[in-house]
Structure formats: C-alpha cells, structure tokens
C-alpha cells in the first residue's frame, strides 16, 4: 500500500506539470461532482473519492505506464484474501443465481442485503442464458478450455475478488476488494465457471 | 426529519447558489429496477417493443404532454400576472421554436450555462410562481404524476422537431462546460470503479440485451438526445434527459446527482455538442 502511495505521488507530480500548461478540467470536474452529489441510501457521497487505482486509470485514460501498472497490479494481488480452508469452489447452482442478479450497491439497494454478481450484464456464461452483455469476454466453456486445475481455480478466485490485480484498468469491478461479494459467493462463482458439472462446461 | 427539512429550506432560502444544489430529504419516486436486471429473457421482449414503438410513433402519446405543456406555456399566469412569454430560452423572450436544440447554452442573465430542463424550470419559478423546492420534491414523473415542468419541457422539445442540433460552443463558459462534461464522462469512482465510459465508451457493446451507444462518437451521441423526453410505455409517463442521467448514475453506483446541477448540465453539454449537426426528431418513446 505504501508503494501505491509513492507511485501515486509520482504520477500526481507529473500531472501537476501538465496542469500548468493546460487547464486542469479533470480536477475541476472532480470538484464539481463533489459539490453536486449527495448521499442517497447506501450510496454515500464519499464514493466520489478516487482510490489509488482509480486515480491512476483516470489520469492516464486507462493506459498507465507499464511499470506503474505492474506495480499496482501486484499491490492489488497482495490484497486478495483466499478462504482459510483452501477450498476455492462452492456450489455452481448458487453461482448461476448470483451471476444472474444485477442487484447490489446502488442507492435503491438496501443495506445488509447481499448483492448479486451482475456477471450476465457483461459476460456470456451458461448456454441457456441468451440475454447476456458483451462488455466482458465470453466465459462459456471457461473451465473446459482452461482445465479445472488448482492454478486456474486460484486465478479465477483472485480475478473475481480483484479484477484489477491482473489488468489495472479493467472494466470489471473488484467484487471482493469492494465488499460487493463475500468469500462464499465468490466460491460459488468459481464453481459456476470451473465445475465440470456446471452447464458452462457442458459439451 | 421535519426539523431537518425546515433547516434545509432555511439554508436554501439563505443562499440561491446553495438552493440549486440543495437535496431535500423527501421521498423521491422509487426508480424503476435496473433494466439490465429486470428480465432474464429480453430478446423477444425487445423485438416486441420495437414493433410496438413503430406503431406508436405514428401517433405518439408524447404529444398529449406537449399539448399540456403548451397550455401552461401560453395560458398560465404568475401571481403578479407574469407569463412564460417573458421567458428567454436563448433566442429571445417567448421564442420557443428551435430553442431546445440550441441548449445547453450560456445565459447572461443568470451567469450560468443551462440545459433546457434547467432553463425551463428557472422560468417557471421566475415567471409562473412555481416553487423550486416543490419541483425538487418530485423532479421526475412516475405512474401517479407527470409534473408540470416535465410537460412544459416536452412542449419546448416538440417545438424543435426536425431541426438540427446546434448547441453553441462560442462563449468561453460553453466550451469550459463541454470540457468538464467530457471529464465527468470519464471519471471512474465508486465501489464498482464505473464511469460513463465503462458502459458507453466502445462501439457495439451491450448490457444484457440493451444496446449501449458509444456516446463519445457523434453518430451515437445523438442517442443522448433522440427520443428524449421519452414516453415510458411501461407506466405511461414522460421521462427527461435529467432522469436518464440520474438513473445511469444509480447504475454507476454513484451517490445521487443534484437535480438540475452543474454536473448534469456539463454532461449534457458534452454529449449534445458531440451530436451537433444531426436532426432532432422530437420527443419519443422509450421503454
């Protein structure tokens, strides 16, 4: 985390040089948002603050210098918490329900009610679901193509926990990191993608 | 709750600038559920909807709201006899024709860039005696009520039917508003790390079966304009661009933008100027 701050500071310093030459509309935009937006329900006003990763991606139009991206990806990966019992796969049926649900974290969602994964909003996953989004890649046959090995399980768990650990400015939310999904929920999603019984991997 | 409300109202009265951003702690209409989550099987529904829309567009129910808005614009008088004939939408007092497609724009009388909805509400407060805090209590339509200001906006929009979008970019403040809007569009934050660009930054993407326009491109930025204000078929009421922005911020997992706030004007200025030159077909139908 310390390193994150050092890199962030370095990058902000570069930004400051630029800001002298051209007007810093980005900073003006951030200030305007903070003035105009108010807490509603669980969507609190402090959500407008950028964390280190968001700040770097926002300042580089999602193309941070490679060295910075690698450094921050490593920080993000270091923060992934794996299940204590080492079991990374839960119940694929529960995973399918979670993948279907687009609930969670909006001001119309209730505090304390577990959210869904929003996965079908962006990904093709199971073969029966034809209403899927295309912001993410197709995950159909994911386990078939990758093999249900311990390494794949670990990668998949970590990817869902924190997509930015592998691709700093990914469009995909950091579900575990943000507290949007619990450990048990992420295990169910890993099972949806990797369990040989899951329809995702049917012939 | 009551006490907070009155404190806020006092504070709002004390400062006009604050009033514009004041958030009333009153019950807002419950936003419809995230469309993306609304149905797992939308393929067939989308096709049905498109067919239905074609039929309806011949005889657009939005015109009912236009007529209601026109009535308010032409006949309603304020407490001191003032009327909307004094309202300048940018082309001179009382001129409605072509005004909608030339906003957001700089208004010297208030020293602000305003989008159409903001300007219309401004005039209804100034000339017709509507109370801003009442309008803020229900800014958007729901099944029970399409507020007057929404009908007036629909009328004003209808008076720009088949005209070219021409949001001015001459005044330095208009350019500045555009630039800030462009940055807001790209600003990622919140628990999901979303910005507008996450969903509207690439060609040919979808959420579930809903096509997402790439709003950075002129030919697709028109979708921030085309068909808005829109008649919502599931419910039978009119929704404005301000509503669309509000609901997208909800899906973005952001806190709530102030109604008629600078941030929304900036976003609308950015998208509208990007769509400049294309023909606005008037209020439409949205699912």
Image: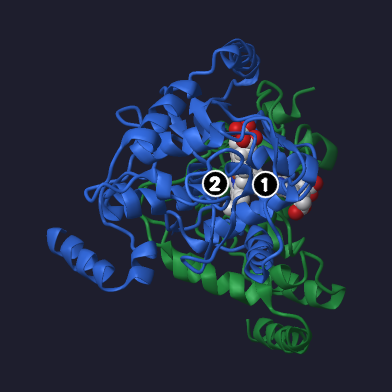
Give the chain letter at badge 1: B
Residue B218 figure quarter: top right
Q: Quadrant of residue A108?
A: top left
Chain of residue at mark 2? B
Point out residue B91 in the picture as x, y percentages from the top left corner: 58, 50
Q: From where the camera sits, is residue A94 visible?
A: no
Relative to A60, say whether B41 is above or below.
Answer: above
- The percent coordinates of residue B12 (x first, y second) are 28, 67
Residue at 55%, 13% in the rendered image? B59
Q: Is residue A195 left or right of residue A87?
A: right
> Pointer 1: what residue?
B199
Residue shown at the point (41%, 50%) measured from the top left = B86
Helix, strand or loop for disc 2:
helix
Please name the residue shown 59% across and 54% down the image.
B104
Closest to the observer: B91 or A190?
Answer: B91
Is residue A136 shown left or right of residue B3?
A: right
Image chain in blue: B
Say which quadrant the N terminus of chain A sits in. Answer: bottom right
Query: Does residue B170 appear in the picture of this structure?
Result: yes
What is the drawing colour of chain A? green
Q: Which residue is mark 2?
A: B248
Answer yes or no: are tags 1 and 2 on the same subunit: yes
Q: Residues within 10 Å of mark 1 (few under 14, many from 20)?
A: many
Q: Is residue B234 above or below residue B201?
A: above
């Amino acid at each position: 985390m310390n390193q994150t701050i050092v890199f962030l500071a370095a990058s902000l310093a570069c930004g400051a040089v630029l800001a002298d030459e051209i007007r810093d509309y980005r900073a003006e935009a951030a200030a305007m948002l903070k003035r105009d937006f108010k807490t509603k329900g669980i969507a609190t006003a402090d959500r407008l603050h950028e964390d280190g990763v968001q700040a770097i991606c926002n300042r580089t139009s999602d193309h941070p210098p490679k060295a910075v991206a690698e450094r921050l990806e490593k920080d993000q990966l270091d923060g992934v918490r794996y299940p204590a019992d080492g079991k990374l796969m839960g119940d694929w049926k529960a995973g399918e329900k979670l993948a279907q649900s687009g609930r969670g974290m909006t001001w119309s969602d209730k505090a304390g009610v577990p959210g869904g994964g929003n996965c079908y909003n962006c990904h093709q996953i199971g073969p029966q679901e034809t209403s899927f989004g295309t912001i993410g890649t197709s995950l159909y046959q994911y386990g078939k193509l990758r093999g249900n090995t311990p390494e794949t399980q670990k990668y998949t768990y970590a990817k869902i926990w924190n997509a930015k650990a592998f691709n700093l400015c990914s469009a995909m939310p950091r579900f575990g990191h943000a507290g949007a999904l619990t450990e048990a929920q992420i295990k169910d999603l890993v099972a949806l993608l990797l369990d040989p019984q899951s329809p995702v991997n049917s012939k | 709750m009551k006490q907070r409300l009155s404190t806020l109202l006092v504070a709002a009265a004390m400062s006009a600038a604050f009033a514009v951003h004041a958030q009333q702690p009153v019950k807002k209409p419950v936003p419809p559920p995230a469309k993306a989550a609304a149905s797992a099987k939308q393929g067939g529904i989308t096709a049905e909807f498109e067919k239905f829309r074609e039929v309806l567009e011949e005889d657009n129910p939005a015109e009912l709201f236009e007529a209601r808005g026109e009535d308010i614009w032409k006949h309603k008088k304020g407490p001191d006899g003032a009327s909307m004939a004094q309202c300048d939408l940018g082309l001179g007092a009382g001129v409605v024709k072509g005004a909608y497609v030339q906003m957001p724009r700089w208004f010297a009388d208030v020293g602000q860039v305003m989008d159409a909805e903001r300007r219309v509400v401004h005039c209804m407060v100034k000339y017709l005696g509507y109370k801003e805090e009442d309008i803020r209590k229900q800014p958007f339509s729901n099944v029970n009520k399409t507020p007057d200001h929404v009908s007036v906006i629909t009328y004003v929009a209808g008076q720009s039917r088949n005209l070219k979008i021409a949001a001015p970019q001459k005044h330095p403040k208009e350019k500045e508003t555009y630039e800030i809007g462009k940055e807001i569009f790209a600003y990622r934050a919140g628990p999901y790390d979303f910005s507008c660009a996450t969903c509207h930054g690439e060609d040919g993407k979808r959420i579930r079966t809903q096509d997402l326009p790439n709003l950075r491109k002129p030919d697709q930025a028109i979708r921030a304009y085309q068909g808005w204000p829109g008649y919502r078929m599931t419910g039978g009421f009119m929704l404005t661009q301000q509503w669309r922005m509000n609901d997208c911020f909800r899906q973005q997992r952001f806190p709530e933008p102030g109604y008629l706030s600078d941030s929304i004007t900036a976003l609308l200025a950015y998208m509208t100027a990007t769509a400049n030159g294309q023909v606005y077909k008037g209020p439409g139908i949205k699912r």
